[in-house]
Image (tube, rainbow, N blue to C red):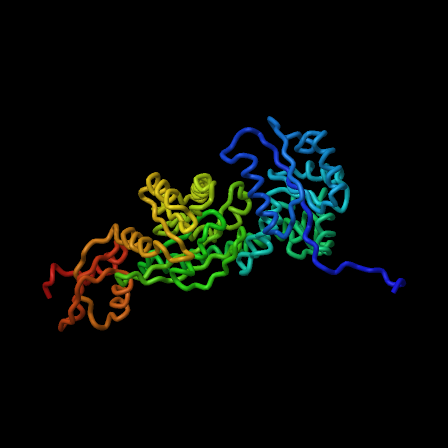
């Protein structure tokens, strides 16, 4: 027995230290931001052992934090057997390199951006999602090649946080020229995806389908709501960014109109700009929507700040002008007094629990109101050979009355502008046949 060296094979979560700098500005307090960073670290499989906070007017150019605090960090890393140090703000390539030298190998030093990209790399399932994440990762890695790439390649062999960058690129491929070539290829592939998505979007527009997009802070319950409304069977888990890839399902409203509902990637404060750019084709679903349901976790103490963060990203992707409805989810977790206070301050919002089904009828009624807001009553005589058009009328309009006449189907319905244009060649005055 003594001749063989013992190797530990059981999984050991990585031990992490979080580092935050309080600059005394911004919507979120340093405590709130670091609490969210801890949830991100836990989502990526780490155990947070210690949190370090420093107050500064501006980042220190060499190590982001002051030299005394940096020395304290290095001592704690050694004393607490730390695997990874995670900064709440983005580090420059030189700051990251200097900090890694200070804490010593094999400890990793990453920032919030790298952590989010790593989580996205783990959770992307579709080809489009993987392409988008890989593009964002390589854009992040490119300026850091000299100081960190050999380190990251070494980490790929043992896994863990920060190890999924490049999605399996071999060490021989890792130089600036090849990374730029790979970025160029990824952009071309995503442009083709974008063209296909625009074509599909135009087809839905031409068909007159009313499109609803679910947006919100990560873990607000968008996927649970989609499942409840449509039975979509989307993966749901109580963690940040549990689902990344958009899912579109159809829903028939009580009035008979069919709509589509799309679940989109969750947002977060300090969402990396490169991720927003990489996911532009996915987020285009939001811009092309007829209605946005902004889903909020009513039980989260930072709900108002999360709403502001989501609206800021909607501005960034040119979707702020799309009509929207504020939907407070997880209301089953509130007390009666908390619900009443929230309703008083948000009288135009809808209050639901996607988990229990409470308030879902009110939500679908609100969707009906929004979908029919621009409708006008039209009467048309549709020839019997136009079977597809008859089907569209029943799916896309609210049929008020209909009768089968010698010349075709005489129908009076509330129709959207798009459907009125489609029906114009068959429109008649009143019920005159």
Quadrant containing the N terminus is bottom right
| Residue extending farthest front | 336
Q: Is residue 87 left or right of residue 261?
A: right
Q: With 276 as the anchor, is 324 left or right in this view?
A: left
Q: Residue at x 63, y 31 (%)?
A: 54
Q: Position of residue 391 (x, y in %)?
A: 27, 68
Q: Residue furthest top?
A: 57
Comparing 84 with 316, the one in front is 84
411 up-or-down from 18: above or below: below
- Looking at the image, the residue that sits furthest to the right is 3
Q: Quadrant of residue 8?
A: bottom right
Residue 281 screen position, x and y as percent: 47, 52
Q: Residue at x 60, y 43 (%)?
A: 112
Relative side of 43 to 245, left or right = right
Residue 68 point in image, percent of width and height: 72, 29
| Quadrant of the frame with the C terminus | bottom left
Q: How many marks?
A: 0
Q: Quadrant of residue 347?
A: top left
Question: 279 or 343, which is in the foreground?
Answer: 343
Q: Identify whether 172 is placed above or below 33.
A: below
Residue ID at (63%, 34%): 53
């Amino acid at each position: 027995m003594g001749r063989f060296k013992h190797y530990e094979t059981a999984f050991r979560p990585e031990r992490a230290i979080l580092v935050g700098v309080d600059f005394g500005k911004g919507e979120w307090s340093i405590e709130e931001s670091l609490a969210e960073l801890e949830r991100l670290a836990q989502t990526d499989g780490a155990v947070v052992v210690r949190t370090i906070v420093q107050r500064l007017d501006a980042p220190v150019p060499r190590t982001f934090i002051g030299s005394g605090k940096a020395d304290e960090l290095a001592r704690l890393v050694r004393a607490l057997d730390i695997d990874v140090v995670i900064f709440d703000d983005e580090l420059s390539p030189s700051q990251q390199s200097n900090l890694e030298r200070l804490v010593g190998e094999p400890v990793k030093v990453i920032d919030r951006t790298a952590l989010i990209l790593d989580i996205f790399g783990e959770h992307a399932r579709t080809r489009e999602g993987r392409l988008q994440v890989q593009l964002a990762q390589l854009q992040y890695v490119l300026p850091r090649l000299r100081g960190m790439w050999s380190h990251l390649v070494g980490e790929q062999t043992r896994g863990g946080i920060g190890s999924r960058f490049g999605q399996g690129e071999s060490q021989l491929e890792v130089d600036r020229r090849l990374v730029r070539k790979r970025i160029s290829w990824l952009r071309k592939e995503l442009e083709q995806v974008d063209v296909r998505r625009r074509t599909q979007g135009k087809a839905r527009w031409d068909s007159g389908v009313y499109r609803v997009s679910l947006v919100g802070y990560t873990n607000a319950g968008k996927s649970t709501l989609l499942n409840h409304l449509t039975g979509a069977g989307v993966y749901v888990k109580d963690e940040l960014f549990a689902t990344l890839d958009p899912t579109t399902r159809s829903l028939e409203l009580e009035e008979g109109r069919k709509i589509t509902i799309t679940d989109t990637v969750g947002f977060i404060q300090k969402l990396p700009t490169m991720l927003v750019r990489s996911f532009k084709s996915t987020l285009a679903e939001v811009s092309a929507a007829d209605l946005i349901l902004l889903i909020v976790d009513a039980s989260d103490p930072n709900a108002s700040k999360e709403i502001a963060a989501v609206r800021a990203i909607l501005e960034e992707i040119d979707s702020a002008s799309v009509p929207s409805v504020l939907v407070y989810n997880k209301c089953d977790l509130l007390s009666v007094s908390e619900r009443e206070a929230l309703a008083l301050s948000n009288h135009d919002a809808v209050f639901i629990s996607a988990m229990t089904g409470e308030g879902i009828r009110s939500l679908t009624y609100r969707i009906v109101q929004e979908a029919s807001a621009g409708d006008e009553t039209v009467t048309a005589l549709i020839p019997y050979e136009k079977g597809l058009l008859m089907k569209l009328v029943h799916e896309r309009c609210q049929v008020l009355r209909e009768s089968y006449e010698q010349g075709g189907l005489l129908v009076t319905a509330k129709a959207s502008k798009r459907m009125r244009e489609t029906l114009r060649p068959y429109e008649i005055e009143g019920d005159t046949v």
